């Protein structure tokens, strides 16, 4: 993994509004990363709202993630390699997991 600049990660158009999503990050020591998510709302092409969220995430491998999800009662439903919902392929840099809680 490496630092990533803030980059477009999707646009949704609804009537005269557009919602833009951007994502970026910076690698920290001890297998951690600061993830930056930005959500922008435009009306008639003018920015009217912007939300920026910073969070620290841990970096683990795919096998360990699947193991932890299973141990805590989740099943992996789908895996993506980016925020545009592209299916994950072995070797992709980013793994986004959609998991569901197993009913008890």
Image: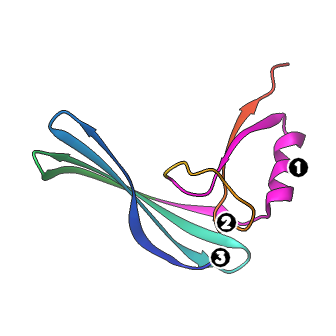
Q: Is residue 29 above or below residue 57?
A: below
Say left or right for 81 vs 15: right
Q: Residue 67 shows which numbered tag?
A: 1
> Residues in magenta?
54-83
Q: Reply yes or no: does residue 73 show up in magenta.
A: yes
Mark 1 touches mark 2? (CB < 8 Å): no
Q: Residue 39 shows which numbered tag?
A: none
- Which circle's residue, 3 or 1, is located before the other in the chain? 3
Image quadrant holding the N terminus, namely: bottom right
Q: Nearer the viewer, residue 49 or 80?
A: 80
SS class, disc 2: loop
Q: Is residue 42 above or below residue 91?
A: above
How many C-alpha atoms fall within 10 Å of the one at disc 1: few (<14), some, or many (≥20)?
Answer: few
Mark 3 touches mark 2? (CB < 8 Å): no
Inter-mark Cα distance, 3 to 1: 21 Å
Where residue 93 appears, x then y in whole percent?
65, 69
Location of residue 34 (image quadrant): bottom right
- Which circle's residue, 3 or 2, is located before the other in the chain? 3
SS class, disc 3: loop
- Which circle's residue, 1 or 2, is located before the other in the chain? 1
Inter-mark Cα distance, 1 to 2: 19 Å
Where residue 26 appears, x then y in whole percent?
54, 76
Where residue 21 appears, x then y in whole percent?
37, 53
Q: Nearer the viewer, mark 1 or mark 2?
A: 2
Say left or right for 61 vs 8: right
Mark 3 lies on residue: 1
Mark 2 lies on residue: 92
Image quadrant holding the C terminus, namely: top right
Where residue 7 appears, x then y in whole percent?
40, 67
How many C-alpha atoms fall within 10 Å of the one at disc 3: few (<14), some, or many (≥20)?
Answer: few
SS class, disc 1: helix
């Amino acid at each position: 993994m490496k630092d990533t600049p803030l980059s477009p990660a999707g646009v949704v158009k609804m009537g005269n509004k557009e919602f833009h999503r951007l994502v970026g990050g910076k690698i920290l020591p001890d297998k951690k990363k600061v993830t930056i998510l930005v959500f922008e709302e435009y009306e008639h092409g003018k920015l009217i709202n912007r939300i920026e969220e910073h969070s620290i995430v841990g970096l683990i491998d795919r096998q360990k993630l699947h193991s932890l999800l299973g141990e805590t009662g989740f099943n992996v439903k789908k895996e993506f390699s980016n925020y545009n919902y592209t299916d994950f392929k072995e070797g992709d840099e980013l793994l986004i997991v959609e998991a569901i809680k197993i009913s008890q």
